[in-house]
Image (cartoon, rainbow, N blue to C red):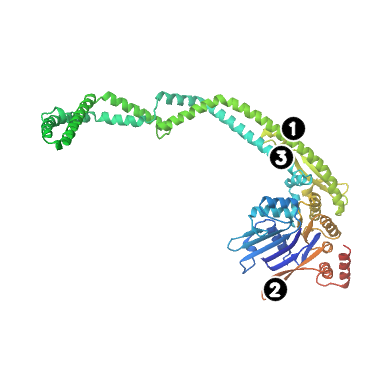
Amino acid sequence: MLRELRIKNFAVIDAVELELGPGLNIITGETGAGKSIILNALGLIAGERGSLEIIRHQEDEATVEALFEGLPSAIEAKLSDAGFDNNGDLVIKRILNRSGKNRVYLNGSLCPLAVLADVGGSLVHIYGQHEHHILLQPETHLNLLDAFGALDAAAATMKEDFTALFTIWSQLTETKEGLERRRRERALLEAQTEEISAARLRTGEEDELRASKNILTHAEKLHQGCRDGEDLLYEGEAALVGRLAKFAVRLRELANIDEHLRPSMELIDASLAQLQEAATQLRRYAERTHFDPRALEQLEDRLAEIQRLKRKYNAAGIEEILVLEGEIKQSLESLERGEEQIAALEKSFALARQAAWTSAERLSHDRQRAAKKLKRDMEREGKSLGMLETTFEARFLTREDRADQPPFFIGGRKLTERGMDEVEFYFSSNPGEPAKALAKVASGGELSRLMLALKSLVLTPGVVSTLLFDEVDSGVGGRFAEIVGKKLKQVAVHHQVISVTHLPQIAAMADCHFVVQKEIEKGRTFTRVNQLSEKDRVAEVARMLGGIKITEQTRRHAEEMVRGK
């Protein structure tokens, strides 16, 4: 239960403190006084995102702080899972700063907004003044029916089964399309792999061929250069080897005289041997190096073939062509395995389809049972809300449109992640008149009462502790206002209810009554919120009954309403 609420620098509110109680807490005040601002502040406590525009003019930050007592066990478990200590109470604090440095605190510890949204959304549920308009949207009716029948878990299972079915169906469809595409391309793939295989390409071959071409192109130059080197070293009249050999003999004689020359002699001997080997290698190279026009032509033809393949397959080099060849071979091999893959996927698809349809049929059966109970309960609630001859139905519709995803149709029922059902509420408030689509025949007042009836049926004690109603009485007047008030009072038996209202019939039933007043001081607007005593409550209800001029009769009427609640 929400025990205390503190608001500071929020819109036109300077500073407000409210001490709320159990049961029905009513907030009243003149139009524009700022009643809904209080609910907007509680929206921040529930985890809604805040706008910097709500920070009071000339202030740097706005603060909303709330104390909850007697937390439900589910909330305590969420807090423990998130790492927050609690002793049955919870203090939530939101700070919005113009600099953008917004902060959230749970029991004094910083908290991510996502955690607050999870925890706060389970503590406070806000029903806006236009929420009954969702009844005008048939696509929301199935969710309301599921909530009434406590079928949310079954609906979540249905969604999981449908997702699994859709995933396998997508895989099967993609595999079939890919297999068919490869079948059409098979001749081309076979021709490509045959062409690449016949080319007998090798990694690094292109570089080797270019090097060989370079050698053949300069063969005569290489041959003559090696012959000249051989002559210089060995064959010529003044060859270095012959002259060095003569000096080596003389140096050996000198080394016999002085041992210090022996290292030089050994170096000369080693050089002589190396020069002789170099001359031999030059001679052999020259002997095998000759210009061969035919060999050069063959090299150029091979390089031209490689270039052609590179252009054809848009490859930078032989390596990319060989990678492509491997991919083509894999595609051809996958054609052999494709039928086996499709057979396995079709089996998985059949199993997933059966599982999804089983879930859908089970869920549909439970929904139809819930729809019968909803009809009885809503017609009973309708009578309690002044609609004595109410007819209410949750009709299951069958669509004949089968344009998308034929595998998801069975017996004229289309399967979606929500199951096989399409539901729309039908309504009649006139005896003898058939029920028609609620969105087409219900008036604004009827919609408000129907939504309140639905909420009173759907709400589960202990799940959400505090319920906020922002002018749920919109469109209701006269004697029906008192009926709506009694229904709020009934809901407040199991939940703490905070309601903004303009109707004295509802305000008179409050267990705790607050009035919002707008004041102007020194050229600035301030919103004040005061908790009313019994005497003040009579005065406020009288104001709501009589307007500007309050007669003694109006005051007595107000007193009867307050004390007769």
- The quadrant in which residue 343 appears is top right
For the residues labelled 1 and 3, the Cα–Cα distance comes to: 22 Å
- The quadrant in which residue 110 appears is bottom right
Which quadrant is the N terminus positioned in? Answer: bottom right
Where is residue 97 drawn, in percent x and y? 61, 63
The reply to whether residue 183 is visible in this rendering is no
- Kind of residue at badge 2: Ile
Relative horizontal placement of residue 433, taking residue 346 as reference (left or right):
right
- Kind of residue at badge 1: Gly
Vertical side of 359 occupied by 384: above or below: below
Structural crowding at the residue carrying mark 1, measured as other residues with C-alpha within 10 Å and reported as few (<14), some (14–19) or many (≥20)? few
Which quadrant is the C terminus positioned in? Answer: bottom right
Relative horizontal placement of residue 30, taking residue 212 as reference (left or right):
right
- Kind of residue at badge 3: Thr
Which comes sooner in the sequence, label 2 or label 3? 3
Give the residue at the far bottom of this rendering.
522
The residue pinned by badge 3 equals: 157
Where is residue 238 drawn, in percent x and y? 11, 31
Nearest to viewer (mark 1 / mark 2): 2
The residue pinned by badge 1 equals: 411
Nearest to viewer (mark 1 / mark 3): 3
- The quadrant in which residue 47 appears is bottom right
The residue pinned by badge 2 equals: 520
Relative horizontal placement of residue 533, taking residue 106 as reference (left or right):
right
Where is residue 310 drawn, in percent x and y? 40, 32
Looking at the rendered structure, the secondary structure element under dot 1 is: loop
Q: Which residue is more in the foreground, 465 or 350?
A: 465
- The residue shown at (71%, 32%) is 354
